[in-house]
Amino acid sequence: MMLMKQQEDNNKTVTEKNTNLTIYIQQLHDEINYLMNRTQELTKGRDDLNWTLEFILTFDTFPVKDFCRNKRCQPCQNSWVLFQNKCYLFYKGASFKTWEASRQFCQNQSADLVVVENLQEQEFISNNTEPYLDNIHGYWLGLRQINNSWVWVDGHNDTLE
């Protein structure tokens, strides 16, 4: 009888330890999930900071007031729009500008006329622009004809179909 009681006590102890271990394992899984999520958040934060630093380093003097409002830096200047890691200014000026004047305006903003790299970017631009004066007058792209070839302002040939 004494042996049976001792066996029951041992079984109860083992069951309690097993339950405690199961709870502890679940707590560890929860902690692992939390740490993995936190790691993803910190990695994104680090990547954002590295992107910001790389961007800042493209300037000789960084225009803090244009990019860092309320002590929080943004990838684009105020009133510019971010799409596919590029910033766009959709100028809605009152007067018509020639291609050359439009390019000079962009360069004065430390930018250039847009170089369209893919269909999604082309659609984004079309969806965010308004025609000047009427539907015939649109907007300037960074594309020009040089010696019977269409060339983008960054120097590569037109590849959009």
Image (cartoon, rainbow, N blue to C red):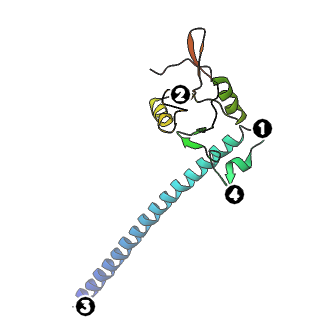
Q: Cβ–Cβ below 8 Å for labels 3 and 1?
A: no
**Residue 71: mark in rendering:** 4
Residue topped by disc 1 = 60
Name the N-terminal-most of marks 3 and 1: 3
Foreground label between 2 and 1: 2
Name the N-terminal-most of marks 2 and 1: 1
Q: Amino acid at mark 1?
A: Asp
- Vertical side of 44 occupied by 105: above or below: above
Q: Amino acid at mark 2?
A: His
Name the N-terminal-most of marks 2 and 4: 4
Q: Determine the CA span between mark 2 and mark 4.
A: 40 Å
Q: Determine the CA span between mark 4 and mark 3.
A: 75 Å
Which residue lies most toward the right here?
A: 61
Q: Position of residue 158 (x, y in %)?
A: 53, 19
Residue drawn at x 72%, y 34% as measured from the top left: 108
Q: Determine the CA span between mark 1 and mark 4.
A: 21 Å
Foreground label between 3 and 2: 2
Name the N-terminal-most of marks 3 and 2: 3
Q: Amino acid at mark 3?
A: Met
Q: Secondary structure at mark 3?
A: helix
Foreground label between 4 and 3: 4
Q: Cβ–Cβ below 8 Å for labels 3 and 2?
A: no
Foreground label between 2 and 4: 2
Q: Secondary structure at mark 4?
A: loop
In the image, is 121 to the left or to the right of 51?
left
Name the N-terminal-most of marks 1 and 4: 1
Residue topped by disc 3 = 2
Q: Secondary structure at mark 1?
A: loop
Which residue lies most toward the bottom here?
A: 1
- Vertical side of 29 occupied by 63: above or below: above
Which residue lies most toward the top here?
A: 147
